[in-house]
Amino acid sequence: MLVRNCAGGVVFHKDKVLILKNEKQEWVFPKGVIRSNNLPEDVAIERVAYEAGCRARIVSPAGRTNYEFYSISRMRPVCNKIVWFIMVADDDAVKPNAAQNFDNGGFYDIEEALEKITYSQDKSLLMLSYEKYRELI
């Protein structure tokens, strides 16, 4: 099994959260693989900017999730281990990166985001992150 360490952001603007829709029609948070000497914090900030066209800053760690899938292109199972950060954007401008296969996205009210988000662990991550965000801001 290929194990990949990743980092991503749960990005808030006021009482809304950033989610993106990918080519599989899944609603997810921006994230990416941590390469060589990169810090998880830097990867999270860069992936939010690259995938969503959104500038955001980290305010707190959010937690970790893992998920496994079978990669058809790699012909083997993959486990993504993701470290998440609670992030804040100064505005709600979002431009999903079509070159990264994101065709929709934006900042959504928490309840609407919970309805859209595809994976239950991401829904749990959002609820915990939102609670912590409200305490911090």
Image (cartoon, rainbow, N blue to C red):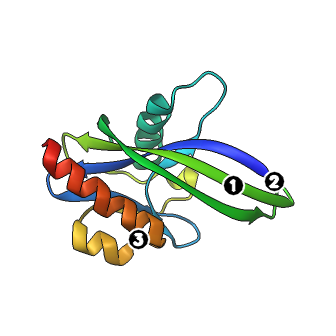
Res. 1 mark: 2
Name the spot of residue 77 as percent of width and height, x first: 79, 60
Residue at (21, 48) in percent of width and height = 133
Q: Amino acid at mark 3?
A: Ile
Name the spot of residue 131 as percent of width and height, x first: 21, 56
Q: 51 or 74, which lies in front?
A: 74
Q: Residue furthest right?
A: 75
Q: Residue furthest top?
A: 37
Check disc 1 and report the residue beneath it.
Answer: 79
Q: Earlier in the sequence, mark 1 or mark 3?
A: 1
Compute the Cα span from label 3 to label 2: 27 Å
Split into 4 quadrants, where in the image is the C terminus?
top left
Check disc 3 and report the residue beneath it.
Answer: 117
Q: Amino acid at mark 1?
A: Cys
Compute the Cα span from label 1 to label 2: 7 Å
Q: Residue 117 sits in which quadrant? A: bottom left
Q: Is residue 132 visible?
A: yes
Q: CB atoms at circles 1 and 2 under 8 Å apart?
A: yes
